[in-house]
Amino acid sequence: MNVLRLSLQEIAHRKLSFGLGLLSVMIAVGVLVGAVTMLGGHDLRTEQLVAQKEAETREEMTRMEDDYRRIMKDMGYNVLILHKDQSLEELQRLNYPTHYMPEDWAQQLADQNVETLNHLLPLLQEMVSWPEMKREVLLTGVRGQIPFADSPKNRRPPIMQPVEQGEIKLGADLAQSLDVAEGDTVTMRGRNLLVREVYARRGTQDDLTAWVSLRQAQEWMNRPGQINGILALECLCNVEELGSIEYHVTRILPDAQVYEFSSLIAARGLARQRAAEAHEKAIEQEMYYRASLREERRAFAGILVPVSALGAAAWVMFLMMANVRERRAEIGVLRAIGVSARRVQSAFLLKALLMGVFGGIVGLVVGSVAGAWLSEVPPGSEGFTSLLNARLLVGALVGAPLLAALASWLPARAAARQDPALVLQEE
Amino acid sequence: MVRIAKVSKIYRAGNEQVRALDDVSLEVNAGEFAAVQGPSGCGKTTLLLMAGGLLQPDAGSVEVDGEDIYAMSLERRAQFRARKIGFVFQQFHLIPYLSVRDNVLAPTLALPISGAAERVEELLGRFNLTSRAAHTPGELSTGERQRVALARAMLHEPRMILADEPTGNLDEHNAAIVLGALAGFAEDGGTVLLVTHDRMAAGEAGRLVRLDAGKLADDGGSSHRDQQVAG
Ligand SMILES: Nc1ncnc2c1ncn2[C@@H]1O[C@H](COP(=O)(O)OP(=O)(O)OP(=O)(O)O)[C@@H](O)[C@H]1O
Ligand SMILES: [Mg+2]
């Protein structure tokens, strides 16, 4: 016989009382561990949310930057030379010019060798119906670039190849929606055209455009010898110097205007900045909300933790007092047999320790899981294990038995001090 | 043996005083089986507890095996009990959640007892309890419970057994078993001090002591039986 065996048997005999004590310890530990885990989980979740938001922002910024770069590249400080009567508002609305000019304006510009201009590309662009496909399509007629008069610029490789008669080139989305690929033949307005090329996606209206030779476009649009725009690509200038291009162009072609994209670029830049600001604000608000939620949770835990700890201590003390009363006769006979007061006390303290250890373990598990759920970092999810800190584990496993033992100290001492003679006389 | 010398005990409850023992002296030798008789409230239990080192007298001294037990510290006296004294009570005072075997082994909680494992089986056999060894006291008959209490009092081979009305709740048959065991213990050289109302129990004892209102009324020095034989 030893005190541990005695205590275990007694516990087995009075399961309910032990169970109730265990439950209270479990609740106290569960609340503490739950609160700490929940706050840890809260912080982790906040970090995750902010990181996610930041990643989203970064992604969006990158996408906008890509867009911007693509536009810059597509336009490459490009300008569009238009008839001076062309309404820019209409151009933006329809996506193609509606005023026409003679095709040889392009040649006149080339002949003058304007320093800042590169790669002159006359084009004729219109929305036309494609009866065979039962749809409208933005059709662009191109003839390749106009060679400059006696200029080293001509030695640069042309950046846009002309489209040959009997051939067609398609934007990516258009090709996809028509379900045609390079090498296929399509029929347009009664003419069979070889699909020479399908361009890779650019994210612009080019993706929905069909290119044919300028002659073909002029024929179909009934605009012989006419164009409605000259693209001047890769101009050797900064965006700020676009004004000088206009000066040179209108000196040669008084009835022309230069459509520059700088305002568009600026708008894009501004939009990007606005988006960044909005994102930053959203993150800030999220952080603010999370911080106030955390404070609320912390305050609540700040009350609940000590209340449940005190409650558990009081409850354990009460149970132990009841236990000591219940075991008066047993204590008396043990003392009569010669069991020391200290050993009698240790039997009660051991029982309290067992209550604390097992209540602590169960509370630790329940609290961790509950706290993790409350903070939306459920067990098994990313970061859950990081919430289980060793200090808390040790603290709960040492603290709970300590709390139970402390609460049982006075009852156990009362048991040890009980006068055996008094009990043994009560017959 | 136990030597009780001029002990007095006064219980105080508020203003009231109860003179439970008044200048009582009594010596019971090794091998002697003494029965204390007397009307209810005359101080029998008080005397027994005092002899067992559980109740400090207001005056006088108690020697057990030549040692003044109330000169010892509380813990030393507990150890002394664990080594030399066995108790048997009317209410048995078994530990309700322990098996019969563990109840008999309870004295090992106080002191390690060499050979306790074999001794417990021997005692269970002697008191016809082997088949009940794994039962708890609640599952036993009254007679069986008292036999368990007796076995517990004997596990550590004490020098003295103090028994307070051990047959009070038993029928004749079971009472005879208990009294026989006590007589056997005395025959083997132990000291027995038995408190009883029961004439039959008193009849088993080798010596009768009468207590009346806290005073030793008659220490016959010999038992009823002897007197009957003599008369
Ligand atoms: N703790 C106590 N406080 C006050 N009075 C007590 C106490 N214990 C016993 N007494 C009184 O002391 C007297 C002797 O009590 P004791 O228990 O020794 O009697 P007893 O001879 O054993 O009686 P019974 O035969 O009924 O068991 C009684 O009058 C009892 O009421
Ligand atoms: Mg009595």
Image: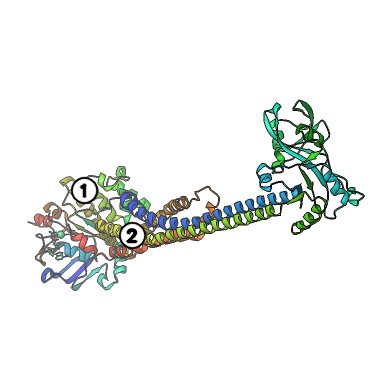
Relative side of A301 to A46, left or right: left
- What residue is disc 2 on? A311
Quadrant in which the N terminus of chain A is drawn: bottom left
Residue at left offset 38%, top offset 59%? A304
Q: Is residue A152 visible?
A: yes
Give residue A115's quadrant in the image: bottom right
Quadrant in which the C terminus of chain A is drawn: bottom left
- Dot 1, crowdedness within 10 Å: few (<14), some or many (≥20)? some
Residue at left offset 11%, top offset 72%? B15
Distance CA(mark 1)–CA(mark 2): 53 Å
Relative side of A416 to A71, left or right: left
- Helix, strand or loop status at disc 1: helix
Q: Nearer the viewer, residue A318 or B208?
A: A318
- Dot 2, crowdedness within 10 Å: few (<14), some or many (≥20)? some
Q: Position of residue B6 (x, y in %)?
A: 16, 72
The chain containing the residue under callout 1 comes to B
- Helix, strand or loop status at disc 2: helix
- At label 1, which amino acid type do we have? Ile
Residue at left offset 67%, top offset 44%? A90
- What residue is disc 1 on? B177
The chain containing the residue under callout 2 comes to A
Locate ligand 1 by image quadrant.
bottom left
